[in-house]
Amino acid sequence: MEAYNFTDIEQRWKKHFKEKGVYGCDLSKTHKKYYTLVMFPYPSGDFLHAGHGRNYIIGDAVFRYFRALGHHVLNPMGFDAFGLPAENAAIHKGIHPEDWTLKNIERMKGQFYDWGMGYDWDKEVVSCLPDYYRWTQWIFLKLYEKGLAYRKKAYVNWCPKDMTVLANEQVVDGGCERCGTPVEQKDLEQWFFKITAYADRLLADIAGLDNWPDRVKTMQKNWIGKSEGAEVQFKVEGSGQTITVFTTRPDTLFGATYMVLAPEHPLVTEMVKGTAKEAEVKAFVEKIKKQSAMDRTGENAEKLGLDTGVKAVNPVNGKSIQVYIANYVLMEYGTGAIMAVPAHDTRDFDFAQKYKIHIVQVIDPTDEVKHAWKTSGHLYDPQQEAYTDDGKLINSDFLNGLPVDAAKKKMAEWLDEKKWGRGAVTYRLRDWLISRQRYWGAPIPMVHCPKCGWVPVPEKDLPVRLPRAVEFKPTGESPLKSVPSFVNTSCPKCGGEARRETDTMDTFVDSSWYFLRYVSAKDSQQAFDTKTANQWLPVDQYIGGVEHAILHLLYSRFITKVLKDLGLISFDEPFRRLFTQGMITKGGVKMSKSKGNSVQPDELIQKYGADTFRLYTLFIGPPERDAEWDDRAVEGGFRFLNRVWKLFQELLERPDFKTGGAPEAATEADKEARRKTHQTIHKVTRT
Ligand SMILES: [Zn+2]
Ligand SMILES: [Zn+2]
């Protein structure tokens, strides 16, 4: 009997599949089409370790399964090749990012070949090549035309280590998503995508994403963070100024005993100008500016405030209340100002206690709560704790006796009637900051002319090529600024001397549309062909890590909706089904090269073959959950394949096998095997 010589078998078939192009997908055949896609990798490291394999191997199983069912399956692959990780690695190694990236791509493609992946390489996309980023730039221009790409000066997140700004989505627990360094705030003029214009739709359409994990949907909902409430205006005493706040609790307005402005609020300087407090306020603002968002608003952050000496008028009762500035209010959220109701908000309560501010209870707890307190012996004192639950209004004039919900509505109506405010909705979602002060990204296709201002590069002049000869080490200034041949250009409008934008685009812009490029990968005339895209998209099955929930997955939904509104595609969600695989751990921590616990698939394949690697990866545990890598269990997978091989060899030696095993010759064991086979097929297909 022939032994299980996996090397021979795998080499032979991989070569055969490649030569015959069996993984290619003819896009003109749209009958029973199926588009399966795995999130494309960053070629920032020099090899893929076994932990990376899970994503691709699950995807490959989906591909083969639908092929086996007779579908035309598109299973493409590409590389998310721009961005900080590749640039940082290249700097670290003293190699040009382009060389480093392209070398890694070759290495990874070799690995995919070794693993036996069924990719259609004719449709490969590489986001750092001009034939791709030209269309990323084109998408920028489309957004610009629509007023969805704009420039503004704002406080933005700055990573002092990576020396670039970051989108809000790239700040995790107050630190840089890439390197963990606490993020600082910087006042800069930058390019933004107006994703907030789509907040409502991005939120509403989550309801239709039936085949997305609940976890991802919840994360997106929370990130978009819709809150309903009211805008209220407070007049500043002794001046014509007005402070506008947004509150989700307009019902508690009678309990508002002070106000807080973000130190960056534009009114602050104006309000204190020429007062005794001016210098003190200025010093405080400077101090808070140095704090990270985490230091300011984190769970254990110390609340720092300063009485500005200014007073405002509470519109519902005409009472004069103090105006503070404090670190826990950020300019980026709401209006950058709050009305504080210490009796019914924990943060306000803590602050009021610290600064000895008056506390007025306006919600009387429900009978259930009172009963529970009675049973447990708890004595409620509004001067000692904040009560944040439901109840009925007290100390609130025309709202007295109303339950919270009815009181919110009535107050919004009252504000509207008296012109003191109105019912309003706000979102937590901010516009997407896309400028980066780094080299390795797609240049933003804009030109600044002293006469005409910002002028878009005409479509026919795309791509705006990224020059190769650049000192790309980060300095905090865009490296492209130091390349005169790049910077100096002529104005597309008036022909005069002008300068190019030197920031590059966030790499998440590249990946926000790549799934469309696969169906037109070789097209030099357009980003994608509308008809083909409409036939093949949305992606039927998308697979990737949950860490992209509010980054890539939200951005892709946004760009898809924009393209739909431009009439370029007919669908408004990019991914029909989403699967998020669990990560592979070793020794209880995520497998990674930097932690020194990564397993080299190349060695594994040499020892056991790619099929064992694939089998073990699929069998390691429920695919949606994290799983611990176990070298001994790999051996188990290998033994299993040996048994399958042996069984098949025995079958080959049976005299009736060559004739297909006539039914009448079937033994009881054959029949049992057949039953099991069909039961399994049924189980796999129907459940
Ligand atoms: Zn960083
Ligand atoms: Zn001009």
Image (cartoon, grey):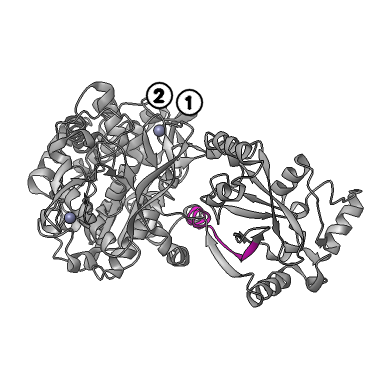
Q: Which amino acid type is marked by label 2? A: Asn
What secondary structure is marked by label 2? loop
Q: Are marks 2 and 1 in contact (CB under 8 Å)?
A: yes
User: Residue, x 91% and y 53% (percent of image)?
Assistant: 375
Q: Observer-nearest residue: 520 or 302?
A: 302
Where is mark 2, residue-wise?
A: 597
Q: Observer-nearest residue: 482 or 243?
A: 243
Q: Which stretch did the figure color magenta?
A: 217-234
Q: Label 2: how many residues lie within 10 Å, few (<14), some (14-19) or many (20+)?
A: some
Mark closer to the chain start, 2 or 1: 1
**Residue 326 at what x, y percent from top left?**
63, 43
**Residue 218 at what x, y percent from top left?**
52, 55
Q: Is residue 534 magenta?
A: no
Horizontally, residue 619 falls left or right of residue 406, namely left
Residue most extreme to the left: 19
Where is mark 1, residue-wise?
A: 587
Where is 315 relative to 89, above or below?
below
Q: Inspect this view and state whether residue 103 appears.
A: yes
